[in-house]
Image (tube, grey):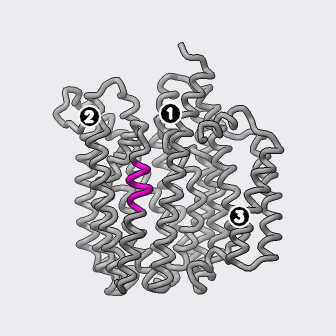
Amino acid sequence: MPSETDSTSDSVRSIARGASLYTIGKIISDAGEFALHLLVSRLLGANLYGMYAYGKTIAFMALLVTNVGANKSLLKYLPQYEHQPAKQEFVLALAYGTSLVGAATVSGGLFLFAPAISAFTIADDRFIPILRLFAAILFIDTLANVGYATFRALEIIEYEILTKRILKPLFRVCFVGLALLYGASVYGVVVALAVGSLLAFFIMTYFFLTRVSIRPRLNSPAASPETVKSYYNYSVPLTAKDAGNLLQGRVDILMVGFFLSASTVGVYNVAVVVSGLLYIPLLAFNQLFPPVVSRLYTSGNLAELQRLFSAITRWIFTVSLFFGLFAIVFRYDILLLFGEEFTAGTTVLVLFVIGQLLNAATGPSGYVLMMTEHQYVVMANEWVFGILNIVLNLFFIQAFGILGAAAATAGVLALRNIVKVAEVWYFEQLFPYHRSFLKPIGAGVLAAIGMLVVQLMLPSLIGLVFGALVGCLLYGGSLWVLGISQLDRQLLTEFR
């Protein structure tokens, strides 16, 4: 029988593998997204960029619910049924069938009601075809996401990374760049995005057929009303949870477009995009952490789950803190890359960075709740805080404009994550915090001082480069001097 240390090593190895592969892919993916936003914002201007960002936001919001919880259900049930391939095939069939219906329904509705949505929000006829093109992208990406989730659940995440995180953004940047080079309008840009998504979908399908042994089978011998009930009892609350999450994550952009203007949406969205980089560490460790939680919880190994939960939360916070401090210190210089008119969003960026730092500080609390069968609690969280976000945005935007939207959304994000940590403690007696969290905080203070000195002494672009270098050296060096634990060394070894 493997020892507790061996079990922890296996879990860390799996999580580190997923996190390291995801980080590589996410860096490439976000670099592609960053390049896209730079190209579109600089060449089309704040107004057309605002329409592009608004349509993309609507499609992204819809994408969270079109799979009807299939992505997260596969993360739970494929590992759970790893010794029952017939059940895996049936669950996969449920995921694909439900996603196909969801994609057709939501994409079709978005296409048909595009004129009404435009009249109610941007109020510009040019926005209607943009929204309809994003409806086509939504359909493609919904089906692709089932394949990506299958790769994650089976812990062959390299195929998701290659197709979704590397090839897809690469295709998009190349096609959008060519479209803009030949003078395409915003419509050509969205068509280029659709072509990139379609090519990535075909490549994902090839890997699914050649690297995954299970196939979707509705007529599987393991098909039973109990399995169907169990699947939808898990997926439907998570769909409702994702719907509630929409009220927090993107409804502020919709409300900015409704109350303010397309150009303001452009300024606001750039701040959202930049602050979203702080989300990378959390997403990276969440790639293979959910299947590990599912296995440890099912086997009753809560002691190891506690160790991993605490360590991973600290790792996420440590990495995110450096990026957050860098974004705050060089906020003006970063936004200047997109164009002079986008520097109006510096305070918005600071507010979102603070919100994302608090999000990182609570670690994978949401996945711990989901994988320990508290999906209804997660659903309630998203709806309660989603409604709170709408109410606060409604009043704050009219009173304080774009800053009101950022303050309301960042504040709700922070409060929601604090509540999730409390719930994990209440339901499972798992608590992520330890005095070791003081190490990254101390290192962060020193790094921030060094970056501030660079920012005051050097001009914008040169300051960005040298500031990142100086801050990284001070932050990493301070952490090393303060001491690296055995588990931290193991993680670094697995990353290498």
Question: Which of disc 2 and disc 3 is earlier in sequence?
Answer: 2
Label 1 – label 2 distance at C-alpha: 21 Å
Q: The residue under label 1 is which amino acid type?
A: Val
Q: How many marks?
A: 3
Front in this rendered view, residue 76 or 260 = 76
In terms of secondary structure, where does tag 1 sit?
helix
Q: Which mark is residue 89?
A: 2
Where is residue 372? Give x, y as percent: 49, 34
Which residue occupies the foreground of this view, 434 or 205? Answer: 205
Residue span colored magenta: 160-169
Whole-percent x, y for residue 26 in the image: 51, 55
Ranked by sequence position, the earlier of labels 1 and 3 is 1
Q: Residue at x 62, y 25 (%)?
A: 303
Q: Is residue 294 left or right of residue 168?
A: right
Q: Check disc 2 and give the amino acid type.
A: Glu
Q: Which mark is residue 292?
A: 1
Residue depth check, mark 1 versus mark 3: number of the one nearer the observer: 3
Nearer the observer, 252 or 6: 6
In the rendered image, which quarter contains the C terminus?
A: top right
The residue located at (25%, 71%) in the rendering is 111
Q: Position of residue 395 (x, y in %)?
A: 56, 74
Circle 2 — which element? helix
Q: What separation in Å lies between label 3 and label 2 (alpha carbons)? A: 48 Å
Q: Which residue is mark 3?
A: 468
Q: Are marks 1 and 3 in contact (CB under 8 Å)?
A: no
**Which amino acid, mark 3?**
Ala
Q: Furthest-left residue in view?
A: 219
- Is 394 situated above or below 154? below
Name the N-terminal-most of marks 1 and 2.
2
